[in-house]
């Protein structure tokens, strides 16, 4: 059975809801605040809730935030390949959601920012596994090189999924150039695709992405409430989204990615997996918090409407 092997970073989100961000030096009162497992946890929870076994290959810290992250993963049935790191706690992200649903993040990396070849050797990938790579990992000095070496040594039949995130803005770094030929699935939102390619709109970004990636790479570019674009090279089509009342966009892209991979693992065609992913993202934005991906039954219900 296929598994999702997640090589990214599980951190803890301090989630706060507010009307609007203050000006520099200002102050506002938040409407709510809570600590939640976040980062890579969101994708893993989405996949797990939709029937895909998940293994977290990253590190997790020793301390209050590491305890919270582990408890969240255990509650979801996510397997952890590594024991808790003894010298650092798990990192923290302050996640601010305005009334417009716009999000602002400030992150501090902890134990999850390091990973060794020995760590990665603890798990033997299967031929039908999906290995998830976060762009954040390529920016971490204590993790990027061992991770890239491990990915490039994987058998070709193992599917590598790459999510650039908001900080990987170009294809010209040494780590990015090394990884590009090994990417089997690209999953990002529209602004991330625009930043990476320099295009003005998604229609222009899609052909630019195909120039950087192998011809067989499956592209998935999310377009907010409009759904997403999915396909290979010149065979890319739009899959429409679902109309909902959004209250918090935090975690919607992660829900989309996790459910999309779960759909592919079950044998769905990319377009059908994308429709389910669109439904999951639509449901996620109707709820507060980062890990709000729905389960299989809820996705089934919305898709069937």
Image: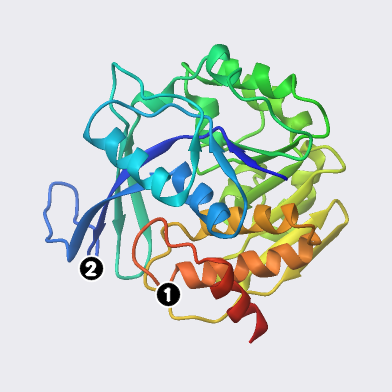
Describe residue 10's horizontal placement relative to residue 130 as left or right.
left
Q: In the rendered image, is residue 201 in sight?
A: no
Residue identified by numbered label 2: 19
Report the quarter where the C terminus lies: bottom right
- Quarter of the figure with residue 64: top left
Q: Height in image: 108 above or below 296?
A: above
The residue positioned 74% from the left and 33% from the top of the image is 126
Q: In the rendered image, is residue 56 in sight?
A: yes
Depth check: give the residue in front, 78 or 256.
78
Describe residue 120's horizontal placement relative to residue 96 as left or right.
right
Q: Position of residue 173 (x, y in %)?
A: 62, 24
Residue identified by numbered label 1: 246
- Quarter of the figure with residue 68: top left
Depth check: give the residue in front, 238 or 295.
295
The residue positioned 58% from the left and 16% from the top of the image is 145
Q: Position of residue 109 (x, y in %)?
A: 35, 29
Q: Position of residue 37 (x, y in %)?
A: 35, 46
Q: Position of residue 114 (x, y in %)?
A: 44, 20
């Amino acid at each position: 059975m296929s598994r999702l092997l997640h090589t990214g970073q599980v951190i803890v989100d301090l989630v706060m809801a507010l009307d609007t961000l203050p000006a520099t030096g200002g102050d506002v009162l938040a409407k709510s605040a809570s600590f939640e497992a976040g980062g890579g946890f969101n994708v893993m929870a989405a996949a797990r809730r939709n029937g895909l076994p998940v293994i977290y290959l990253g590190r997790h810290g020793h301390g209050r935030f590491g305890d919270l992250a582990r408890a969240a993963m255990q509650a979801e049935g996510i397997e952890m390949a590594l024991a808790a790191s003894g010298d650092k706690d798990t990192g923290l992200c302050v996640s601010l959601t305005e009334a417009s649903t716009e999000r602002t993040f400030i992150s501090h990396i902890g134990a999850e920012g390091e990973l060794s070849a020995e760590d990665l050797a603890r798990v033997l990938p299967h031929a039908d596994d999906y290995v998830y790579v976060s762009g954040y990992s390529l920016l971490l000095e204590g993790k990027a090189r061992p991770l890239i070496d491990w990915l490039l040594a994987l058998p070709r039949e193992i599917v590598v999924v790459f999510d650039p995130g908001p900080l990987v803005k170009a294809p010209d770094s040494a780590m990015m150039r090394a990884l590009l030929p090994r990417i089997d699935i690209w999953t990002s939102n529209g602004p991330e695709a625009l930043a990476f390619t320099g295009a003005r709109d998604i229609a222009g970004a899609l052909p630019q992405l195909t120039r950087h990636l192998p011809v067989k790479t499956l592209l998935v570019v999310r377009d907010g409430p409009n759904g997403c674009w999915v396909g290979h090279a010149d065979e890319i089509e739009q899959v429409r989204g679902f109309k909902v009342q959004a209250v918090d966009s935090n975690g919607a892209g992660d829900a989309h990615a996790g459910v999309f991979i779960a759909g592919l693992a079950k044998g769905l065609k990319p377009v059908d997996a994308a429709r389910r992913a669109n439904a999951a993202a639509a449901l996620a934005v109707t709820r507060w918090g980062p890990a709000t991906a729905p389960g299989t039954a809820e996705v089934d219900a919305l898709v069937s409407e």
